[in-house]
Amino acid sequence: MEPRKLLSFPPGDNSSDTLIEGIHYNLTNLKYFNYTFYSNRTFSNGSRCVLVFEPYTPLRLLENGTFLNSTSCYSPIKPIKVRAVLGLVYASLFALGIVFTLINLRKHGRLFLPTEMRFRAVGRRWQWYWMLAVGAFGIISGITGVDIDRYYLPHLPIILSNFFWFLMLPCTMAVVWESVRHWGSWQERQLIDPEPFMLRQDDRRSKVEFFIPLVFYLCFWMNFFMVFPRSWASIEMQRDPIQARNYAEISATDIRFKLAAVFLLLGWLTTIYSLCHSIKHYKLRNHGIKNRTFGLLKYTPKKFLMTLPLSLVMIGYEAACAFEFSISPLKLQPYLGFVYGLGWGSITCILIIYIVAGYLDPNEDRELIRQRRIRGAEVDAEMLIKKKPLWWTLLRREEASMQAAIARNAREIGGGSATSRNIERAIEMASISPVVNEDEHRRLERNLGSLRTASSLLFPATTSNALHGSFKDPPRGQDVETTPSNASLSPTLTSPRSGSTSSGVSIDPRSQQIHSMLDV
């Protein structure tokens, strides 16, 4: 970056004319609108800047101070350089990472067991949500970084690229945090699945697991508020070395960027504590400092052994940028090895490790089903229960399906006492039997005696022997004759209205021979 100097206007045809790149301009208008001619071949008056070198030389200066057919100084007219190429490479990697992250989100976010209050599905998905956010921010930062090299003077692209890169830092730390937190939750779920009441929910362990996420996200948001709510316009002030040193470097190395790195380091320490807490409560305990150290390394998943140091490198680079402006991405021409090696490379490696680990790790619900199946087989073996072979299961299934088809056909026919419908109905009706206690039984007997007394008063001459005898068939060859008892009974049973008896015995003196009940 060459130093920018003020130049005097070249002479023209007269005192009110200046000749620049073969074009005559009204010198009086240039001075009236406070235009200054700089050594980088630009006209600027503080609010407007135009290029005056070929092929962007304005054709004419109008009376209102506007250049005809002019090109702004903040235009992408330069060819892309190394920074733009590296930005496009990383943007492509992040775009590819979003595709694989979505695949892993679908794999690990699917449910194969009923949802539990203590282990919700969103808990296992947060890691992938943050990875999607990091991928999106990386794509935007990499693409907008192309115009950092192409703009003639630094402007909005350097702000946008660094804005989204600084967003990637806390989001990447959130990816690491959520992976560690959920790993501890997964260990707890496997531990209590055989015995749900093994761990208490009101002890110190549960309280620590409640407050640790609050501490981490407090550090997360403190990092956010230290970096982003600020004026980013001073980062553009890098049009010459003096301006960059007086404005951009002071803004890029202020106390707020240093505190942001400190808060991110506190979030990393919180993640380490959460990992140690999970190993302590959900893995076998070791005694002694040496054994605990080896146990910590033994039980820590391999992906954490790689991502935790990488995230620490990322935080260290952010802290170094707050002290040394030459390696900061906020500088227009920094050392690209530090920017894309430590800043972008560590983030990309973290995402790649989690994508590969997500591809290798099974779905948690399916893994839990597999563990339950193994425990069930062990219990069956202890109880000497042998599992039937496959051909036996298929045979029983075919037999059951055939019996079900026959029963379904019988139910469709209906109407028969042998159908399952009538059998079920008979069973249901038979199962409803009245329960009568002793007092109720005595009351029913009293009512029955009252009914008998009332019937004898209404029909005094009717006796059970007479009524029963009137319906008996006489012996074959004999006629029914009116006996004195029948004669005495007939006037009593005679109806005064129709002349017929209530017992159905004819008052006709002629005998009637009854052969069967069908003749009555």
Image (cartoon, helix red, strand yellow):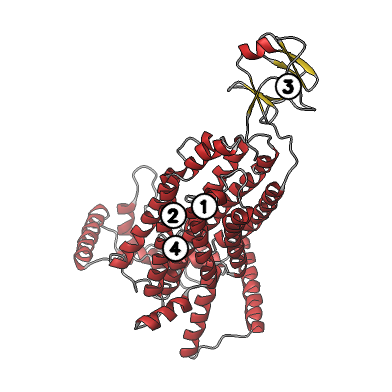
- Asked if marks 1 and 2 touch (Cβ < 8 Å), the reply is yes
Looking at the rendered structure, the kind of residue marked 3 is Ser
Q: Which residue is mark 2?
A: 264
Q: Is residue 516 visible?
A: no
| Disc 2 element | helix
Write the residue at 43% across / 76% down: 296
The image shows residue 186 at horizontal and vertical percentages of: 46, 68
Q: Is residue 191 above or below residue 388?
A: above
Nearer the observer: mark 4 or 2; the answer is 2
Please report whichever mark, 3 or 1, sits nearer to the chain's N-terminal start: 3
Write the residue at 56% across / 52% down: 327
The image shows residue 468 at horizontal and vertical percentages of: 36, 66
Q: Residues within 10 Å of mark 1 (few under 14, many from 20)?
A: many
In-front residue for pair 72/102? 72
Q: Residues within 10 Å of mark 2 (few under 14, many from 20)?
A: many
Looking at the rendered structure, the kind of residue marked 4 is Arg
In-front residue for pair 369/433? 369
- Residues under labels 1 and 2: Cα distance? 8 Å
- Residues under labels 4 and 3: Cα distance? 57 Å
Nearer the observer: mark 3 or 1; the answer is 3
Q: Which residue is mark 3?
A: 70
| Disc 3 element | loop
Determine the image quadrant of residue 110.
bottom right
Q: Which residue is mark 1?
A: 169
Nearer the observer: mark 4 or 1; the answer is 1
Q: Describe residue 449's horizontal placement relative to residue 267 as left or right.
A: left
Please report whichever mark, 1 or 2, sits nearer to the chain's N-terminal start: 1
Q: Which residue is mark 4?
A: 181
Write the residue at 74% across / 38% down: 78
Looking at the rendered structure, the kind of residue marked 2 is Leu
